[in-house]
Image (cartoon, rainbow, N blue to C red):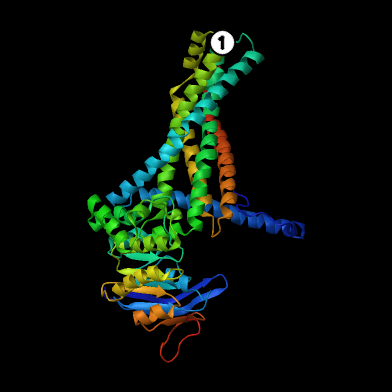
Amino acid sequence: MGASVGTEQSPEVRGRPGGLVRGLGQSALEGSRFWFGCVRMVLFALRALAAPGAAARRAVLRVTMAQIYFTGAEGLPFVTATALVVGATIMIQVHVAAPGMPGEIVGNVLVTVVLRELAPLVTAIIVASRSGTAIATELGNMKASLEFVGLVSLGIDPVRFVVLPRLIAVTASVVVLEVYFGLLALVGSAVVALAFGTPDLVALQDGLAATLRLADLGLFAVKGVGCGALVAVLSCYFGFQVKASSTEVPRMTGMAVIRSVLGCVIYNFLVTVVFYALFPELSRPV
Amino acid sequence: MADGLVLAKVTCHRGPVVVLENASLRVPSGGTLVVTGSNGAGKSTLLQLCAGLLVPQSGTVSVDGIPLEPARAEMLVRRGIRRACVFQQGGLIANISALENVALPLRYHADFLGLSETTIEERARFCLGAVGVEPASMSALPGTLSFGIAKRVAFARAMAIEPNLACFDDPDAGLDRENAEVVEDILMSYRNDPSITMVIATNHRALIERLGVAPHELVGGRVVRLDLLTMPPTSLV
């Protein structure tokens, strides 16, 4: 995540003696600048939560609701279609790979694969590709056309007015969409199970109930909040990296999506590892 | 407004351009500073410094003893500093209408400015009307407006906040005579208002003469006072 943000080592540097060391140093510098920038943005946004001004809070809330509508409500059709197809596909694969597998085991597979892994990750990828690109593009264009300078001149903090609403809205939307994805994917699986006549839906339900734990709610929340925040922060960060030209916007938008997806995959993996380390009993099949 | 706008030992470089080099400058409260200079001399950068939109490499910029820093944008309004800036490119928010652009700062600071929603709407419409923006254009997005109308909207936004610090970058550049006159009238009223400290970056001789203010030229990192009668700078048009 941290290496060579926004710059690539030139062939001349790579070819020169000592170029590798210089390149590594440059990458480390860029990486630390990237991390520092992201952390600073989050800290400023959190500080802005407590900033005074009831009218400003109302203005921020309006932007937040608009972003929730765009990311959450308008994202529903895509999440619906993807979840149903993913759930159905997994049930078909189970049917092909292990025909006659007991419903309890299939339920276990659905919880571990769909609910614990795919729901947070696929939702985050959908949100990164829809809203992440939109946010990075919008902010990049705002930066290039001096709109942020205009906001500051009006006494409006861009972090409070632009970043904070997107951070809250995208995070909340990912959590809600993630739950929605999980439920819809189970519906998709159930429809295929019904069509094939196996596994038995009652046994499948028993398997789901036996595998699901209260800790799964925590896992859902941690993954949803983390992935949502990652997408929002990285999209805003790369939007702000545009200097003065609108030609930088597509490059930064691409960077935002790639980093968001990569960040979510790595984050998802780490949370899964920590989850099973904390709750080893959940790693055993029913 | 005792101190006015003060730049103390400010050094500011932008790329290869030395805008200011350890320069100090004071615009008394209610005064007007007109800055001229050749293209690329850094007039716009100086204007952004004066408006507190840019952090210099060294030195301080303050108004009435309150430091102007981009990171303290909201705090300035709460401390009574109401800035109005009009940039060469307008700086309007692209995804909201002209009316919403004008109302935005009023709505955002409504509690500190003591404005109700009705007052905000009325004031925004009044300011747009005062600069000759037709009602049909008020609901249009800035991108769909002509350059002249967009600039008028930017002026309306500046007027709406009832500023005590106003910064204008090439205010009449690219405008036809009718639009330029509207802008000049606003600048004249601000020039005569003792509660408004104003900085204007322009090379337009007619505007400077109408304002009746001795211009300062930005040259080699220094701000040099000029006398229009005896030493007209070559950069003036």
**Vertical order, B166 against A108 (above or below):** below
Q: Residue at x 37, y 67 (%)?
A: B68
Quadrant position of the N terminus of chain B in the picture: bottom left
Above or below, B18 against A59 in this view is below
Q: Position of residue B234 (x, y in %)?
A: 50, 84
- Which amino acid lies under the numbered mark 1 shown in the image of this protein? Ala
Task: Give whichever of A22, A84 is nearer the camera.
Answer: A84
Q: Is residue B34 left or right of residue A228?
A: left
Secondary structure beneath dot 1 equals helix
Question: Of residues B131 and A12, which is closer to you in this image?
Answer: B131
Seen at 51% across and 19% down, the residue is A186
Residue B23 seen in this snapshot: yes
Residue depicted at 47% across the width and 60% down the height: A146
Letter of the chain that mark 1 sits on in the rendering: A
Give the percent coordinates (x, y) of residue A4.
Answer: 63, 52
**How many numbered marks appear?**
1
Query: Can residue A230 be seen at all in this image of the molecule?
Result: no
The residue closer to the viewer here, B31 or B4, is B31
Q: Nearer the viewer, residue B24 or A50?
A: B24
Provide residue A18's location: percent of width, then percent of height: 74, 60
Q: Is residue A224 above or below residue A29?
A: above
In the image, residue A229 above or below residue B230: above
Q: Residue at x 61, y 8 (%)?
A: A100
Residue assigned mark 1: A195
Q: Residues within 10 Å of mark 1 (few under 14, many from 20)?
A: few
